[in-house]
Structures are given as structure tokens and as C-alpha cells.
Image (spheres, rainbow, N blue to C red):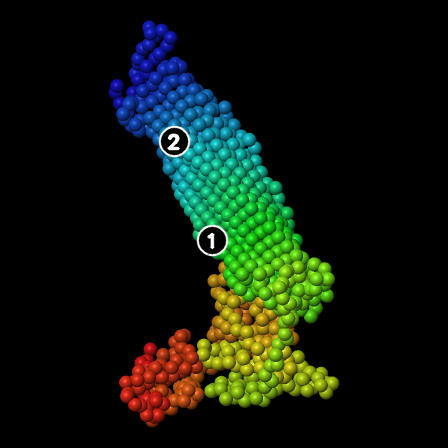
Amino acid sequence: MAQGTVQVTHTGTSRWRRRTGEYASLAAALEAAADGDVLTVAPGTYRENLVVQRAVTLRGPEGAQGSVRIAPVDGVPLTVRASAVVQDLHVEGQDAAAPAVLVEEGTPELLNLRVVARSASGIEVRGSARPTVRRCTVDNPAGIGIAVLDGGGGVFEECEVVSAGQAGVAVRSGAHPRLERCRIHHAAGSGLTATGDGSALEAVGCEVYEVRGSGVQITGRATAHLTDCDVHRTTADGVTLDTDAVLTLADCRIHDIPENAVDLRSRSVLTLTRTSVRQFGRNGLSVWDPGTRVDANQCEIFDSTGDYPAVWVSDGATAVLDSCRVHDVPDALFVLDRGSRADVVDSDLSQVRNTAVSVSDGATAQLDDCRIRDAATGAWFRDHGSGGTLNNCTLDGNRTGVIVTKGADPTIERCTVDSPTEAGVYVSAGGRGSFLNCRVTGSAGYGFHVIDGCRTTLRKCRTERCARGGYEFADGGPDAAHDSGPLVEDCTSDESGGLTPPASAEPAVQRVGRSPGLLGSIPGQRSTEQEPLIAGAGPQDPARTSKAVLGELDALVGLDSVKREVRALTDMIEVGRRRREAGLKAASVKRHLVFTGSPGTGKTTVARLYGEILASLGVLDKGHLVEVSRVDLVGEHIGSTAIRTQEAFQRAHGGVLFIDEAYALSPEDAGRDFGKEAIDTLVKLMEDQRDSVVVIVAGYTAEMERFLSVNPGVASRFSRTITFGDYGPEELLRIVEQQADEHEYRLAPGAAEALRQYFTAIPKGPAFGNGRTARQTFEAMVERHASRVAQLADPSTDELTLLYAEDLPELP
């Protein structure tokens, strides 16, 4: 057969009608062929637009796959309108407004086609066509890989879309194809997409990867069913559902996704069975909007690469997890907003860096027969209207088992909290909650820790082996209602000590309010002996006068400008007090301060003395110092920062809260950083408790200027900035001399001058510690002195006390 010719074998019911002919063009051969004829195309390039309208077989020569190129200048290279067989052809399309292969009617078979095009679509199926497409390859970087439209259908088996300028496979307008063992990759749009009423996509054993968009996108009331499929290495979400979409995933694997592994919204419904979701950058399951629902059964969600909850349910959506595992994630399940709900049954949540279950903004979570292990917080019900039930769950090895705050009111029944490192149950800030038949064992802190007079109900609970005590009900404060505090009924503990249980004539239910301390033995607990009431605090050392404290301040080396500032502020406070006593108006003095300067310049020491001065003047009740930094105030997840900051403020009640390196609360690349929440909380607390806590923020000068500009309310809360200048060589020498005198050492002749020169020459970089450097230098001299004197058999007093120039360490 000559190159560029078509051999047609004509067949019929009679062997006398069987004949063979050769034609110079494909069009002529197709015109001459009848149903059942076989057209074998010789190798070559054909610039024809083929239209197959009869049930013929059109194929390239055996053993020379790809040698026949159908490559017209424009238009559709190959159109099929009959139940034909087309195989072993190489089709090239160049028309951006037309498909390369168009199937419009019949049930044709397309086998071993290679479609290389810059067309609107590589293969397009329309209308009543139901083709079977096997082992075909589509390379179309300008448009859609495979498009099935307008009610079309068919089966695609072992096909591959190697590139697409838009979607890899697009299903629209009521089409319903089935894909089996196909590969779709390097698409510039979604890998698989289905949209529109009546549109349906079924995929079995397929792989979607290297997609610059979503792996699978189902929208606009379309449906899809994926079985045993892999979706991975996308640039957007792995799977996206929107606007009444319905998707079923069975035995699928979704992984290596930089955004949400699965995101569904607007009344979409997703069912997952035995599907794994891993290595995702945002949420594993992200569920939004009323009517949107996800049902997951025997699924695994794990190995997050980002800082977001694995399952996110918000804006009235619903999620159901049955027999699932969620592990190695920052947070496991977040349920937010009124109307949102999560139901979790017989599931494991483990290896959670922050919170396993978080319920907020009026949402509800129901957990039955679940296991929560190795999380910072097992379950946190955060605010008013938020609640639900934990029923027959175990919480093992978490930092805190259950937290209830800000009016949340969950029901916790028949749950066990084992080996928490901080507390089994923690209730604060107006939280409520009912704990029925619950048990806390092996806590490194308290079993049940209820503060702020929270009206929590405890019935038939028990604690065992809790290091700090089984039950702690802290004071609700002077403004607490008379009947505030937890309601306790028939609870027991193996701890001894604490409050005396009521006499047997007392009722078994007691409202515990404003308790002075640990409640180890509680109403209803059996006790073998009567424990005494907790004794009041013993007498304290009398407070020093302001004059005595100012004397200690004056004795500090250097800091002349600091001493003047503190004395001026103290004088203002003292005179204001005297004017009020005389019945005169006194100027309002803002006592909060900003300390700026390098480390080791005495900021903490001055803050401690300042608190003592204010206590001596009657401005503060205690004057004690509570020193914190970013790590003490900023939590790892939403809501924890405010609680940590409130707790630090509470510890500083009546004294000074000293925040070192405060600028770290507002890093320049803050992003989702929770430091701003700490600042906002501080600003509010400084206003609400302005008479009970003095706040001092400290840090490097330039960084503190930036910190003060972050929140408009921050700078207005501080009365003045006090700058701590660096110590000079003389002042550092005086600090060493003070250290030596305190520890009964003396500087030998020449040692003072050597120290002066040492402090002049020492590098003054960012790590230079000023006073800390002086103390470290003294300690180094003492160590070198000891190494030298230890070699002497019978050292004299001078040898035991004198520090020489050679005892100085080498310059860093």
C-alpha cells in the first residue's frame, strides 16, 4: 500500500461482495465505505477534516502506532457521528475555537489515539453520544483536556491527560461520563470538574495530580462519585464543592495539598468512606454554610503541614465523623457559629499540638465513645451559647482535659480524664458546664479547677492521684454573687486535706462559693477523720517605707536619670495622696510605665522597687512583681491568648505586671500571630483594673517605639517612658566591686584598672548584657581565682580573697 493512501476492505453478508480498494484521500475512502468496512490508513500526514458517519473501522497500520497524523490547518480534525471504531491515529488540532476530536452521536470506540492540540478541547463528547475511549492520550496546553457536554456520556478507560490549559476533564450541562483507571495531570485549571443540573461524574481508580487549581471541583447541583482515586500535588484545594454539589469519595487518597484538602460550601453534601486525607496546608475538611454537610466514615485525617484545624465547621454547617482517626495536626476539630454542629462517634483524636475539639460562637459538638490523646487541650467550649455533649469519652495524656470559659455550657457525662499535665477540668471566666459521673486520675495539677465563681455542676465525679488536689474552687472575687460557685453533689476523691466536709445533717448538695483554697474533701465524700479548716496566712514582714525603698534605689550603681524619673513620679503620687486627705483635688497620675534600654541595665530591679514604693504609699495592696514575656501570654490557638493574659493579670493583682521584651507581642511579620490579641486584652484590662495592677512594659528602645504604635490604646495607657542608659566602664567596675564586697573578695592592686580597660574594650553588640556582663565577669574571675588557689598547699587569707588582673577572662 502506497504512503498517503487508504486501503478499504469492503465487507458484507455475502463473500462475493467482499472486495478491497485503495483511495488517495481519507474523505474519498470514507465516502466509499459502508457499515462494517475497515479503513487502514497508510503512514503519512493528512490535512483533512475527517467526518466518520458510518459504523466503519478507521485505523493506522499494525505495528506503526502514531505513524498516521490527522492534522488539518483549522476546524475539527476528527468528527465521529456513528458507532465506528477509530484507533491508532495521531490527531493534531490547531483551532482554538474547535475541539480536536468531536464525538456527536452513536456508541463509537476510540482506541490508542494520541491527541496533540492547541484546541478548545482535546476530546469532546456531546449530546446522545456514548463512546468507549480506551488508552487515549490528550496533550492540549491551550484548552480543556476532555470535555463531556450537553447530556453526553461514555466510558474513558486507561486514558491520560498529560497537559491542559484549562480543566483536565470537564463535565457540563447534564453530561455523565465514567472514568476508569485514568490519569489527569499538569492541568492549568481543575483536574476534574463537573457543574450544572444533571451533570454527573464517576471515576474509579483514577489519579489527579500536578494541577494548577483544585484537583476535583463539583459545583452547581452536579454530582460525582470517586472510588479508589488519588488526588495530590495541586496548587489550590484538593476537592472543592459549591452550590448544592453532591460528592461521594470511597477508598480515596487526598494528599500533598497546599490549601484545604476538601472545601465545601453552599448546601453541598459530601460523603467519605475509608478515605485518607494527609499533608494539607490549611484544613483537611473545611465545611461552611447552612445546609452544607459532610459524613465521614472510617476515614483518616493526619499529618498537617500548616497551622490550621484539621476539620473546620462554620456558618451553620454540619459534620459527622464516625469511626475516624484525626492525628498529627495543630488542632483536630473546630466548630464555630450558631447552627454549626459536629457529631463525632467512636473516633480517635490524637497527637494534637493545640486543641483537639474547640466549640465557639454558639456552635454545638456531640462526641460519643471517642478517645482524645496527647493534645494541649482535649476539648474547649469557649463562649456563650457554645455547648454540646461529651459522652463516654476518654481524654488521656493531654495538658488539660476539658476547658469551659465565657458562658459556654456543655454536658460532660461518664468521661475519664487520665494523666493531664496541668488540670483535668478547668472552668473560668463565667463558664458553666455539667460534669456527671466523670473521673480525673493522675493529674499533675488539679482534678477539677473552677475559678471566678463559675456556676459549674459536678455530680458523682471522682478524682484520684491528683498532685495539687482533686478539687480547687477559687474565689469569685468581691463582686461575685452570694450563690455563685460550683454546685457539687455526691463527688469523691482519694485526696485528704482541704475544707471540712459538712456534718452528716447537712444536705448532699452544696453551692461552693468564694472558697479560700484547695477542696480535697468535698460534700458527700467519705472521710475517716475530720480535717481542720485552712488556716489564714501568717503575719507578714512589715512593709518598708517609701523612704527606705528609695534609699535602696539610690544605692544602685548609675541610673541617675532613672532615679530622677521614679522619684518625680513618687512625689506626684505622694502629694496627690496628701491633697486628697486635705480635701483638695488631686491630679490623676497614670502609673503604668515603659522601660527602654539594653538588657542588664536594671529594669527588672527598678520595677520591683517601684512596686514596693507604690505599696508603701498605699497605691497598691501588695506591690509584688509578676514578670512575664511573650511565651507566658500568647497561646498556640484561638482564644487561649486572652485567657493566658487574664491569668497573668490576675496573678499580678495588687502588684506590678512586668512584661519583658514586650515588642515580641507585635512582630513585624505578624500574619496570623496571636500577639495582637494579647495587646488588645492588656489594653482592656489596664482600663478595667487600673486601680489594682500597674503594668510596666520593657525592651530595646527602637523596638518599644514600634510596639507603642501598634494599638492606639497602648501608648495612651502609659504615663511616661523611662530610658535606661548603658553602663559605662566606671559603673561596670563599681558593680564588680559591689559583687566582690558582697562575697568577701577584694581587688588586688592593678585589678581595678585592668577591669576598667577590660570593660572599655569589650564588644558592645546586641548581646552585651551591661550589668549582667559585670556579674558574669566577676563570676569568671572567681572561677579562675579558684583554679589558681586550689594548687596552693596552705593559702593565706589574702590569697583566698584577692582577685588579680590575671584572673580576668579573655575578651569575647
The type of residue carrying mark 2 is Glu
- The N terminus lies in which quarter of the figure? top left
As drawn, the label of residue 187 is none
Q: Is residue 167 visible?
A: no
Pick the front one: 620 or 541: 541
Q: Is residue 804 visible?
A: yes
Residue, far left: 2
**Taking 787 as reference, is 682 above or below it?**
above
Q: Residues within 10 Å of mark 1 (few under 14, many from 20)?
A: many
Q: Determine whether, in the image, residue 227 is placed left or right of residue 528.
A: left
- The C terminus lies in which quarter of the figure? bottom left
Q: Which residue is mark 1?
A: 351
Instruction: Decide which of tag 2 and tag 1 comes sooner along the chain.
Output: 2
Kindly state the secondary structure of the residue where label 2 is placed.
loop
The number of callouts visible is 2
The type of residue carrying mark 1 is Gln
Pick the front one: 296 or 207: 296
Kindly state the secondary structure of the residue where label 1 is placed.
strand
**Taking 267 as reference, is 77 above or below it?**
above
As drawn, the label of residue 158 is 2
**Taking 398 as reference, is 707 above or below it?**
below
Find residue 187 and report its horizontal and vertical position in percent.
42, 40
**Taking 148 as reference, is 27 above or below it?**
above
Q: Residues within 10 Å of mark 2 (few under 14, many from 20)?
A: some
Q: CA distance from mark 2 to mark 1?
A: 39 Å
Residue mark closest to the camera, 2 vs 1: 1
Q: Residue at x 56, y 87 (%)?
A: 550
Q: Residue at x 56, y 46 (%)?
A: 369
Pick the front one: 29 or 647: 647
